[in-house]
Amino acid sequence: MKKIIAFAGSNSKKSINKKLVLFATSLLNDVSVTVLDLNDFNLPLYGVDNENEHKIPSDAHKFLNLIKESDGIVLSLAEHNGAYTVAFKNLFDWLSRIESKLFFNKPMLLMATSPGARGGASVLDIAKNRFPYHNANIVETFSLPFFANHFNEGKITNTDFLEQLNKSINKFTKSL
Ligand SMILES: Cc1cc2nc3c(=O)[nH]c(=O)nc-3n(C[C@H](O)[C@H](O)[C@H](O)COP(=O)(O)O)c2cc1C
């Protein structure tokens, strides 16, 4: 069975992106899904001095290995001031110090959601442009705007967005 890792680019305990990740992965059939939480990885704020003094934290190696051993990645990025959250950027920077091509060509479903009209479109654009330099294989992207209006009790309630996500899930599944 194919192994998928899924996580949100957020360290919020109430992360709406994690909720979207959980729903999206519930639509996947015949795969084994491991949902990761950035809070479970002990990563100090990246800095060259910290790296020189303390070396790369073991949890960065652990996360990178989880990517390496997976067959695909489901990631939903939270947007802070038009960009990655500090928590995601910190993880990204640490991983890139071990291996620049840190996505290992694994098929990726890349998503974002936010409470606003753009649904995290800015951070999604940043990731779409940048991740390929790190050997990301972005199969599909999906953005859910106005999260509170379109998501309830663990599910997308808007039929158009639900159809869009189902199509993305199908394409992602075929790419595994
Ligand atoms: C510091 C900060 C900056 C934010 N900037 C944006 C933004 O640029 N665009 C946006 O759509 N939402 C922005 N938001 C709102 C987030 O999208 C919202 O908090 C969302 O719940 C974050 O996703 P998460 O719950 O998965 O962490 C911001 C929130 C914070 C705390």
Image: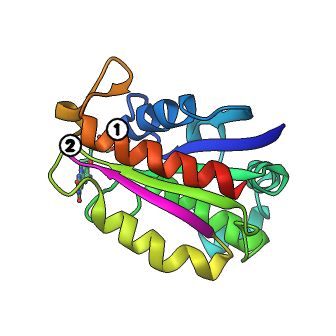
| Tag 1 and tag 2, C-beta contact below 8 Å | no
- Mark 2 burial class by Cα count in 10 Å: few <14, some 14-19, many 20+: some
Left-right relation of 49 to 166: right
Amino acid type shown at disc 2 = Pro
Eyeballing the image, is 21 above or below 136?
Answer: above
Which residue sits at x=38%, y=64%?
Answer: 124
| Rendered image quadrant of residue 35 | top right
| Rendered image quadrant of residue 86 | bottom left
SS of the residue under disc 2: loop
Residue 117: x and y, percent? 14, 52
Residue 9: x and y, percent? 48, 50
Instruction: Please give the label number shown on residue 115.
Output: 2
Q: Which residue is more in the foreground, 160 or 8?
A: 160
Q: For the C terminus, which image quadrant?
A: bottom right
What colouring method underlies this structural image? rainbow
Eyeballing the image, is 18 above or below 53?
Answer: above
Which residue sits at x=77%, y=73%?
Answer: 99
In the rendered image, residue 36 lying in the magenta stretch gets the answer no
| Pointer 2 residue Cβ closer than 8 Å to ligand 1 | yes
Q: Specify the segment rendered in magenta.
A: 137-145
Which residue sits at x=61%, y=42%?
Answer: 6
SS of the residue under disc 1: helix
Q: Which residue is more in the foreground, 84 or 112?
A: 112
Read off the residue under disc 1.
162
Measure the C-alpha gap from mark 1 to mark 2. Answer: 17 Å
Instruction: Please give the label number shown on residue 7.
Output: none
Residue 31: x and y, percent? 73, 35
Magenta stretch mostly in which secondary structure? Answer: strand
Q: Is residue 135 visible?
A: yes
Q: For the N terminus, which image quadrant?
A: top right
